[in-house]
Image: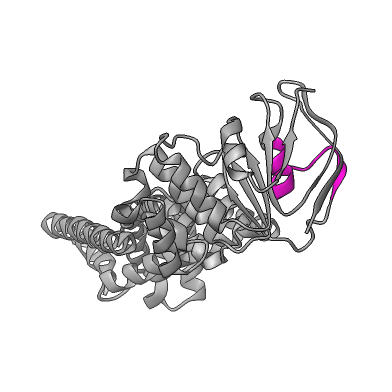
Amino acid sequence: MSLQRILRGFLLALVVGVIVAALSAQFSVFKKLVAPAINVINAVPIASFTLLALMAFHSSQLAVFIAFITVMPIVFYNTIKGIENTDKKLLQMATLFDVPQYKKIFYIYFKTVAPYVVSAATVGIGFAWKSGIAAELIGVVRGTIGANLHTARIFLNTADLYAWTIAIVLLSYLMERAFRFFFSKVVTWKSL
Amino acid sequence: MEISLKNICKSYDDPPQKVLDGLSFTFGDGFTFIMGASGIGKTTLVNIIAGFVKPDSGEIIGMEGKKVSMVFQEDRLLEWETALTNVTFVKKEREYATRLLTQAGLGDSLHKKASELSGGMKRRVCLCRALIADYDVLILDEPFKGLDTELKPIIMQMVKEHAHGIIICITHDPAEAEFLGRDGSANMVLDAQ
């Protein structure tokens, strides 16, 4: 249950983070509107968000929301950096030749931005797990790793506590490996 | 077809330098060569025509609606893509691109990444890319730079065969201008101001 929810939050953050960054790079007005909101999201403690979210959503969606809110700013900032570092002379060349926007994205931006997104995602996976589990623990969401940690804490069951912690580390590691494997396949396909 | 430059002026601040001072010229169909010492504003001039640089004053008449193709001073290739993809990137005509690259002596390197090509080979890919594009104005900024003496006439012949419209060519070599402009192209010589 935790894996599925944290994965959903993480993937949603990845997609939304990249799209919002792309729109911000394209439209300065959009960036002016969105950047302060993302700065605020980045600064607010996870515990505050969790408590606010508990009042707004059903607790089953808590981990999805918290993982999303934690990872999205990381993806956003990294993607923006990648877009800004894209070779301007190549973009100028593509513009001169009237190359359509989708080709610019596929052939030029992808190459520069991809390593930034991968780096953000790799860091983000760890954060998604930390924040998602913390949210489940605060919200005591039934049938989740967070709730099991909560139970272990109440009964001072150190063995369970260690076991769940190791499980979280393993799941986070496996998720990161799976993401890297998937991305290496995408890059290989792109290079064909 | 013509493009006219009227009193084009351009200065740079760092270091302070006036590169173009009231330049007026009319480019017509065929080759026009821009020659002159390094740093006198040849590339600045073609960048103004291509629309990359804004002149301080003056106007360009006749560029409205015209498509520009260019061999840049630097290669500006997608280093991670193949020679063929670099050419089809600007126009999806695989057969024509293959023909051009083969004519440029790159038939065996179609599927090699640009990063694996030598300087001269990259230059030839740039030329093929510029020639395959749709254009009215073709700008060639030292297009034969880095080509060996045996290959140069073959590539110049290829350019002569395929290039059309208004062709503006920066070169340091009067022999290149003579070879390409045998059919009576105008010669423009930019002097240090």
From where the camera sits, is residue A44 visible?
no
Q: Quadrant of residue A156?
A: bottom left
Give the left or right position of residue B142, taking residue B147 as reference.
Answer: right
**Residue A62 image position (x, y, % from top left):** 40, 71
| Number of numbered markers | 0
Give the image location of residue A179, x and y in percent.
27, 61
Q: Is residue B48 on the magenta stretch?
A: yes
Residue B131 visible here: yes
Query: Residue at position x 29%, y 73% from top?
Result: A4
Tell me if B185 is positioned left or right of B92 in this view.
right
Q: Position of residue B9 (x, y in %)?
A: 84, 34
For the C terminus of chain A, give its image quadrant: bottom left
Magenta stretch: includes residue B22: no
Residue A123 vs residue B97, the one in the foreground: B97
Q: How is the protein colored in the picture?
A: one colour
The spot of residue A122 in percent (x, y) is: 32, 53
Q: Is residue B132 left or right of residue B23?
A: left
State the residue in front, A21 or B161.
B161
Identify which residue is drawn at 53% across, 51% down. B159
Q: Nearer the viewer, residue B82 or A137?
A: B82
Q: Quadrant of residue A50?
A: bottom left
Looking at the rendering, which quadrant does residue B116 occupy?
Answer: top left
Above or below, comparing residue A56 to residue B123 in the picture: below
Q: Which residues are magenta?
A: B44-60
Residue at the limit of the structure toward the front, as seen here: B183
Quadrant in which the N terminus of chain A is drawn? bottom left
Q: Is residue B3 above or below residue A59?
A: above
Which residue is at the far top?
B15
Task: Please say if A128 is above or below B188.
Answer: below
Residue found 55% across the figure and 62% down from its top: A20
